Amino acid sequence: QVQLVESGGGLVQAGGSLRLSCAASGRTFSSYVMGWFRQSPGKEREFVAGISWTGARTSYGDSVKGRFTISRDNAKNTVYLQMNSLKPEDTAVYYCAARSSSLIVTTPLSYNYWGQGTQVTVSS
C-alpha cells in the first residue's frame, strides 16, 4: 500500500516556475514507477511525466518536453516535478501516481495509487 500527498501548487504568471512535490508513505517506494498527470475541467487526465525506480529513465508528455523535469529521492520517499516556462494551458490539477511495475506507461488506468491532487494556475 502506498499513500501519496502532493504539494507545491499555486498561482504563477506565465513564464514562471513551480516545483511540485509528492511525498509517499510505505517502505517500498523505490520499487514503484512514479508518474505525474494533470487534468483540467472537461478534459481527460493527461500524462505529464514518469520516472523509473532508480531515476535512470524518464518520460514526458509532448506538451511539456523541454520545460518540465521529473526527479525522485528514494531516501526521502519523494518525487518532484520542476515546471519551468509555464503557460496558461498548463493550468490544471496535478496528480502524483505510483505503479507497481518497472515500466513507465502513460495510461492512467495502469497506475495503482493516486494522490489527492494539487491545483496549478498559470495566469497570462
Image (tube, helix red, strand yellow):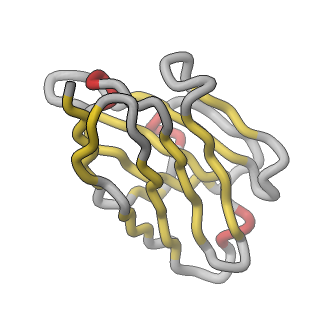
* Residue at 76% over, 56% down: 53
Percent of width and height locating residue 59: 68, 32
Where is residue 89, by image quadrant?
top left
Instruction: Give the quarter of the image for residue 122.
Output: top left
Which of the pair 122/111 is nearer the observer?
122
Q: Residue furthest bottom?
A: 27
- Residue 24 shown left or right of residue 42 in the figure: right
Residue extending farthest to the left is: 41
Q: Which residue is drawn at 72% across and 38% down?
A: 58
Q: Which residue is drawn at 27% across and 43% down?
A: 12
- The quadrant in which residue 94 appears is top left
Please provide percent x and percent y for residue 43.
Answer: 23, 22
Q: In this view, does 58 lie above or below 42?
A: below
Establish if 76 lies above or below 7. Answer: below
Q: Where is residue 116 in the image (x, y as percent from the top left)?
A: 29, 60
Percent x, y for residue 35? 55, 46
Q: Which residue is drawn at 55% across and 17% down?
A: 62
Q: Is 94 in front, or is 123? A: 123
**Position of residue 82 in the picture relative to residue 15 (left or right):** right
Q: In which quarter of the image is the C terminus?
A: top left
14 vs 99: above or below: above
